[in-house]
Structure formats: C-alpha cells, structure tokens
Image (cartoon, helix red, strand yellow):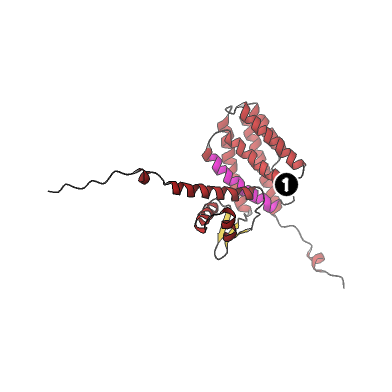
Amino acid sequence: MARPRKNPPATASQDTPSEASLNELAEENRVRHAIVEAVLSHRLPPGTRLVETRLCEAFGVNRSLLRRVFVRLAGDKVIELQHNKGAIIAQPGPEEMRQVFEARQLIENGIIRALGKKASPESLAAVRKLVEQEHAAYSAGEWSKWVRLSGEYHLQVARLLGNTELEDILRSLIARTTLMIALYDSLGHNVCSFDEHNDILTALETGDSERACTLMSAHLHGAEVKLQRDTSAPEIDLVALFTRPA
C-alpha cells in the first residue's frame, strides 16, 4: 500500500514576501508619502486633477503601482476617485470637517492623557524648536511653510508617545485638515494658533497633562469653529450685483 505523499516543506520564498514585492511596497509608500506631503504644503490644492501619465513620468512608476497608491489615498480620504474623471484631491464639506475634528479630539487628547509625565526634556525641546520655527514662518508670511509646520507640531506631540500606529492615523487626519484649511482659509488666517501650541507645550513641560489636554481640546475646537465659519456663503447684495448703470 502506497504511503500518502507529504507536502514539501515551505520554502523561505513561500513564507516571506519576495524582494520584488517589498521593493514595490517601498515604491508605493514613496509615492503616497510624496503626494500627502504635497497636500500638506498646499502644492496640491483641493480639486486638483491627478493625471496618471504625468505622475507616472514624475515618479518613474507604472500605472498599476500608481493606481494602488490612489486606492490607498482614497481610503485615507486624501483623494476622490471619480468615474470617467480619474483622481482629484478631495474637496471636503462641513459635515466631514466636523467628523475629522471630532476624531482628532479623541486621538490627540488620548495621546496627551497617556503621555502623563513620560516625555523627556530632549523630546520636548525638539517640539519647542518646532514652535519657534512655526512662529517665524507665520511672521515672515511663509504661508505654506507655516501650515506644514503647524501640522508637524501635532505629529511631533503624537511621537512623544512612541505609538507609530496612532501617529499614522493622525497623519492622515492632519492631511485632511490641511485640505480644509486650503479650501476654506485661503487668506492665511491663523486657524491653528502657534500661541496655543506654545501654551500646550508649556503645560507638557511642567508635567501638567490635564491642563495640556484642556488646552488641546480648546485649540482644536477653536480651529474647527474658525473653519466652519469660513465655509458659510457670504451675503451678496443681489440688487447691487445685477443692477447696472443705464
């Protein structure tokens, strides 16, 4: 009677991703990161059409890889995939804005509560330097740089906890917040106040996480209110608009 055949032992290539697949994933991450950074720095404003041929040329990748990046970015709500139109940078509305800020409240306040007194003086000094750079950029009228540094401040605070999963989630939310600032705060108002950033950091430096949490909550709420206010349509004097001298 013949013995049952045994399955051959799994090879290393079966158990682990191939070098080629790892390289492809690295390329996907590179392209995705570059697009998100362009959004954060306002170089890709809301509504911008992402032309596949141009992006493939710019990044030196094929369409298959680029479309996988698009799927990931759409999942992060950074872009919208439209039938027969392709991909465009997302154009968030007021309700989406409310939900994004609600999510940020939960995550960022949770991070600060978890931090307690864990943050080292060295890590806090790095955040302090960032606040100074943010203030300098705003004072110099470097709008795009200020917005990027403002978002980076929130990521730096998240990094103090050392949880990369939370940091990745927050990065996506900050990218979407930046879209909202680009759409509704084009005049460069101080939506995300560096003075408030300074106050939050001071509370963390003194080990007062409860005060830091209260300040962060008020800070995010204030930013949302400013943006929501700017989304409302301005009052137009229709008589003056449509009346022309004879």
- Report the residue at 55% width, 66% height from top: 84
Name which quarter of the figure residue 213 lies in: top right
- Up the image or down, 103 lies above or below 241; here it is above
Q: Nearer the viewer, residue 147 or 58?
A: 58
- Up the image or down, 183 lies above or below 114; here it is below
Pointer 1 residue: 143
Considering every residue shown, the one lying at the far bottom of the view is 246
Considering every residue shown, the one lying at the far left of the view is 1
Total labels drawn: 1
- Report the residue at 64% width, 35% height from top: 214
Amino acid under label 1?
Trp
Please, what is the dominant secondary structure of the magenta stretch? Answer: helix
Horizontal and vertical percent position of residue 161: 56, 33
Using residue 7 as the reference point, say whether residue 98 is left or right of it.
right
Considering every residue shown, the one lying at the far right of the view is 246
The crowding category of the residue bearing disc 1, from other C-alpha atoms within 10 Å (few below 14, some 14 to 19, many at least 20), is: some
Quadrant containing the C terminus in the rendered view? bottom right
Horizontal and vertical percent position of residue 182: 68, 51
Q: Which element type, helix, strand or loop, lies under badge 1?
A: helix
In magenta segment, residue 233: no
Horizontal and vertical percent position of residue 235: 76, 58
Using residue 17 as the reference point, say whether residue 139 is left or right of it.
right
- Magenta segment boundaries in residue numbering: 166-185
**Residue 20 visible in the snapshot:** yes
In magenta segment, residue 179: yes
**Residue 208 visible in the snapshot:** no
Horizontal and vertical percent position of residue 204: 64, 30
